[in-house]
Each structure stands twice: as C-alpha cells, then as structure tokens.
Image: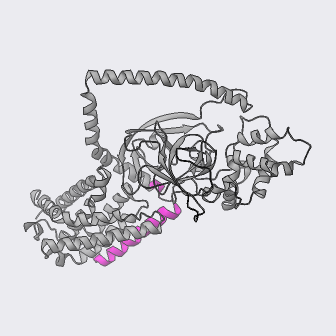
C-alpha cells in the first residue's frame, strides 16, 4: 500500500536533544501546567487567552449548522410565519396577564415582609447567548456560548432558559464561555422542594437530562411530581427558580437514604439560545455576593431571618426566657426558614479567614428588627448538632461544597 | 523534497482539519464513537516525520485539546506527549509493518493515551467512569488505514 511507504516529504533536519530528553522536558512541563491549573489557579489568564485563540475554530466548526438554520428560517412560508405569529401573540397576551397579577403579588409580598414598597425584580439584567457548541465532550455535560468577558460575563454566573435552570459558567474567555450543566455529575445545585420547603442538594445524573438527590433520608417527605426550585444557598443561583421535577422515589428499608431522581425542566438539547442573568446585589432573593462565586456564604437570605423571629417574639414575650422559646419548635422553624443558618456553621468552620460577619452585606432593605437576629444566629448553630434528625440536616454535609463544580473553586 | 517551512504548513493544515473534526458537534451516540482525529494525526506525523513533528507537536495539540475539552490544562498534552514519544522511538519498526498490524499498534497507543487521561481524570477529581470513554480507541484503530491514506495523500498532493 502506497499509503504507508516512506513517502516523500520527510525533512531530515535534526533538532537538539534526543527523543527521550525532549519527552522528559514536555512531560515535566505538562505536569507543572496541570499542577498550576488544578491547585494554584495561576492559569486562569492563560486559559482566557487560549480560549480566545481557539474561538474562531469553534465558530467555523459551528457555521454549517448555523447556516442551515438560517436557511431554513429564511425559506419559511408565509403561512407558517402567520401561524407562529398568532401563537406568539397569544402567548404574549397570556404572559402579560400573568405579569399583571405578578405585580400585585410582588407588592403584597413586599407588604407582608414589612417593607415600605415592593421589591424590584431580582434579575437585574438579561443577556441572551447563543449556544455555539453543545457537548464539548459527550461524557461531560458542558456547552459553549458566544458571550464572554467582553460582554461582562463572569465565572460562576447563572445560566437559564425559558423553562428553568441550565447551569453556570465555568471558564470565561474573551468572546465565549463554557457552561457546566446542572446535569453534569460534577455539578450540584442547592434546591428546595417547593411543596414542603425541604432543602437538599441535586447532583447531576450524567445523562443529559436527569438529576439525583442523594442526600435525602428515606423518611423525607418527597413525592413523584414534586417541583424542585433553587434554594438560594451557595451564592450562585438566586432563590426560587425552577430546576427539576421529581420522577422517581425509591425507598429501601435497609438504606438510610432514599434514592430520588428528577428530570431537569430546561430543554438543553433543543435550545438554541440561553439566558445569562445578572442579579441585583442586596436583593433578598439574590444569591449572596461572594468573590467569584467561590467565597463562602455568610448569612444567606437576610430578609427572612428577622421575619421569622420577629413574628413569634411578640407572641410569647414573658412566658419563657427567649432561650427555651427558641430552642423548641420555633427554633427549628427559624432554622428551616433562614437558609443561611443551616449552611453557615460548616463553612465557617472550614474557612475561618473568610468568615468574619463584617462581610455580611448590610441588609439595607430590611429596616426594623435588626436587633433580633444575633441571638437566633448564635443559638441555632450551638443548639443544632449536625446529626440532628430534622429536615435541614439532610443538606448539611454536602452544603460546604455546594454549587461549585468540584475542583473548579 | 520540499522545504521545511512548506512541510510545516501542511502539517499545521492537517492538524487544524483534525481539530475541527474533533470539536464538530455530533449527536451523542455518534460522538461517543468519534475517533480521536487529532491523536491519529499526531500519530501519523510522529511515525512518518518523527524529526519535524514528534513530541513537541503532540504536546501542542494536546494543549489545544485541553482548551476544548480538558478539565485540567496539560492533561491531553501529557497523554499525547507520552504516546508520541513511544511512537517516535519505534517509528521505523512501525512504518515497516503492514496496515493491519499498524492498526493494532495504533489501537495500543490509543489505549495508552486513554489510560493516561483516565488516570489524570481520577487524580484531579473529575472522574468519568463510563466504559463508553474507551470506545473511541476501537473506532480509531479501525479508521487508521483510511486516515493514514488521506494524510499521506495530503503529504503528496501539496508537495
């Protein structure tokens, strides 16, 4: 076969060093690069430049599908367009009706929380991004989008579609960013079961659409069909965005934990566009501001802690010392309602340097009961050992790793 | 015989094509079967032009792969440096083998490559334990004769 001959075009130009020497050189270089990237994170800058350098290749590779889509769209018939237009118009009307109602509800909610006026929406700015490349590698659920640092995208930013959560950015290049999906086995989202308020962690299932809830005790109140929404812990995703619906609950009498699986609500495989979201800092439902999304979460949702305690304070002022009152069911309720308190102790223990409460963003929008939180804060961690049987403890062990892709933080 | 610069240009051209084939979006089932085109290209040049290509080319191509799909920078670079070293050392023996035996050797090289990746994935805490990750070594070995023929065609045509 001619293909394997010692054919033409073999330049015989020697270069310094034997293969063994050069191999050793490159191998050491590779190991050093790996060490720096993995342990020390010195190479964010290098990665940034490289990602910018390879972006043209990705665009070129992706251009045939894009061209095909464009072609198909531009040859749609008038009839098709009319039908779609009518459908969109109808949908817009529905959404407007919903939004009207939403305004009223938001106002009411603000009043109930004791705020002077209704809170603004938690999402401050949206930026649609096109998916350039799904499945950078089919064994890891990642995707590449066409927005990068020049558009203000940052590492650890939440990515949504119109149905639910998609993931967060992991590597940001100048014009592109890599997104890790919530279904990646290396990703974990702190979630809340909407029906019961039970908080736990949803880990990616690895097959593109499913998630697993591996930390629920087998007596946890969870049913097929329950909706999972983000719990707002972890500093990346804001509170209350839909994530997945439970599809399978398997309880084994022998196992201490239930095996629960859920189906992601977002349609990653059929989306062409996703949304990057910037959240208003200081908003009660926003993720607590943390450095690069990797810092720790000092006190979760500031507005909810005073609310819980101030609600039951006046009811039982003198009958018992506040200690015992808080210690019982009320204490547990406070714990369940204050997302920060359950997750705080392990973190604080883990990284004491980053934990001073001075970091807590001043809860500017929560004027009145500023005097209440300190006792509650001091009490809950002290009185609630991590092994407590109550619901929130189910999330305590994994919470310190929470929504960061492992190894990225 | 052409100049070294022209030769390099052709090599870079094939590497770019291989890189595009590597990152081309495919449906999942096909993606799992997709041979590692860039690795095959590096192997080809390491066998047929060990002095011009060799370990340095392997390292650089690996770095590019890392940017596209590596959890850690340097992972693919190390794996490709390892196999291109082995191949460069044995290039004369490999070159004289018939196509079928070459395919077997390429299969072995791809296994070594994937083994290095597997180990590093595990050590750095991004394990992918699915057996599907090994599938591309097989398709790579099957497609090797064709890939080698195409690459040698590019070598000859542009000469």
Q: Position of residue A55 (x, y in %)?
A: 35, 47
Residue for point 13% across, 62% down: B149
Residue A110 visible somewhere in the drawing: yes
Compared to residue B14, the image places residue A165 above or below, namely above
Residue for point 41% across, 54% down: A207
Q: Main secondary structure of the magenta part?
A: helix
Is A235 covered by the magenta stretch? no
Residue B57 visible somewhere in the drawing: no
Residue for point 72% across, 53% down: A356
Q: Is residue A302 left or right of residue A174?
A: right
* Residue extending farthest right: A318
* Residue extending farthest left: A2
The residue range painted magenta reads A17-45
Image quarter (top left, top right, bottom left or bottom right) of the N terminus of chain A: bottom left
Which of the 4 image quadrants contains residue A269? top left
Q: Position of residue A392 (x, y in %)?
A: 67, 53
Q: How many labels sit on residues?
A: 0
Compared to residue B76, the image places residue A280 above or below, namely above
Q: Is residue A222 left or right of residue A57?
A: right
Which of the 4 image quadrants contains residue A409? bottom right
Is A19 covered by the magenta stretch? yes
Q: Position of residue A139 (x, y in %)?
A: 38, 57
Residue for point 32% across, 67% down: B80
Q: Position of residue A14 (x, y in %)?
A: 22, 73
Along the viewing direction, whichever of B25 and A150 lies nearer the viewer: B25
């Amino acid at each position: 076969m001619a293909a394997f001959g010692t054919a033409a075009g073999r330049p015989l130009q020697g270069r310094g060093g034997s293969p063994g020497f050069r191999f050793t050189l490159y191998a050491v270089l590779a190991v050093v690069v790996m060490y720096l990237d993995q342990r020390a994170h010195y190479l964010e800058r290098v990665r940034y430049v490289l990602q910018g350098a390879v972006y043209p290749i990705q665009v070129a590779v992706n251009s045939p599908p894009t061209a095909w889509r464009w072609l198909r769209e531009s040859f749609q018939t008038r009839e098709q367009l009319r039908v779609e237009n009518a459908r969109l118009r109808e949908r817009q009307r529905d959404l407007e009706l919903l939004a009207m109602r939403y305004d009223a509800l938001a106002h009411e909610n603000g009043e109930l929380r004791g705020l002077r006026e209704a809170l603004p929406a938690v999402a401050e700015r949206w930026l649609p991004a096109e998916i350039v490349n799904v499945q950078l590698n089919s064994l890891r659920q990642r995707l590449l989008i066409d927005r990068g640092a020049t558009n203000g995208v940052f590492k650890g930013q939440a990515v949504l579609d119109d149905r639910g959560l998609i993931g967060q950015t992991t590597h940001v290049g100048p014009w592109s960013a890599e997104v890790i999906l919530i279904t990646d086995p290396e990703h974990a989202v702190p979630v809340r079961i909407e029906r019961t308020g039970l908080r736990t962690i949803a880990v990616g299932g690895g097959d593109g659409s499913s998630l697993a809830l591996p930390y629920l005790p087998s007596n946890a109140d969870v049913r097929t069909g329950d909706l999972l929404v983000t719990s707002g812990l972890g500093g990346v995703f804001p509170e209350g965005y839909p994530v997945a619906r439970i599809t399978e609950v398997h309880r084994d009498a022998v196992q201490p934990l239930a095996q629960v699986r859920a189906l992601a609500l977002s349609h990653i495989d059929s989306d062409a566009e996703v949304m990057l979201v910037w959240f208003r800092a200081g908003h009660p439902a926003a993720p607590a501001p943390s450095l690069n999304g990797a810092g720790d979460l000092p006190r979760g949702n500031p507005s909810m802690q005073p609310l819980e305690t101030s609600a039951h304070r006046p009811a039982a002022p003198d009958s018992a010392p506040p200690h015992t009152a808080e210690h019982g069911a009320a204490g547990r309720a406070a714990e369940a309602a204050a997302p920060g308190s359950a997750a705080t102790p392990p973190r604080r223990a883990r990284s004491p340097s980053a934990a001073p409460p001075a970091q807590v963003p001043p809860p500017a929008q929560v004027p009145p009961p500023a005097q209440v939180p300190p006792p509650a804060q001091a009490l809950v961690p002290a009185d609630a050992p991590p092994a407590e049987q109550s619901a929130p403890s189910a999330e305590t062990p994994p919470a310190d790793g929470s929504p960061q892709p492992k190894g990225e933080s | 015989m052409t100049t070294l610069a022209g030769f390099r240009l052709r090599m870079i051209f094939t590497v770019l094509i291989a890189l595009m084939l590597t990152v081309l979006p495919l449906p999942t089932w096909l993606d799992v079967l997709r041979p590692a085109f860039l690795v095959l290209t590096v192997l080809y040049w390491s066998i047929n032009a060990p002095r011009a290509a060799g370990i340095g080319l392997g390292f650089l191509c690996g770095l590019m792969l890392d940017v596209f799909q590596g959890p850690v920078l340097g992972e693919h670079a190390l794996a490709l440096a390892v196999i291109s070293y082995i191949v460069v050392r044995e290039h004369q023996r490999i070159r004289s083998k018939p196509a079928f035996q070459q395919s077997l050797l390429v299969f072995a090289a791809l296994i070594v490559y994937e083994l290095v990746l597997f180990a590093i994935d595990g050590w750095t805490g991004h394990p992918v334990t699915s057996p599907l990750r090994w599938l591309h070594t097989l398709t790579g070995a099957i497609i090797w004769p064709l890939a080698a023929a195409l690459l040698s065609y590019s070598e000859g045509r542009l000469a």
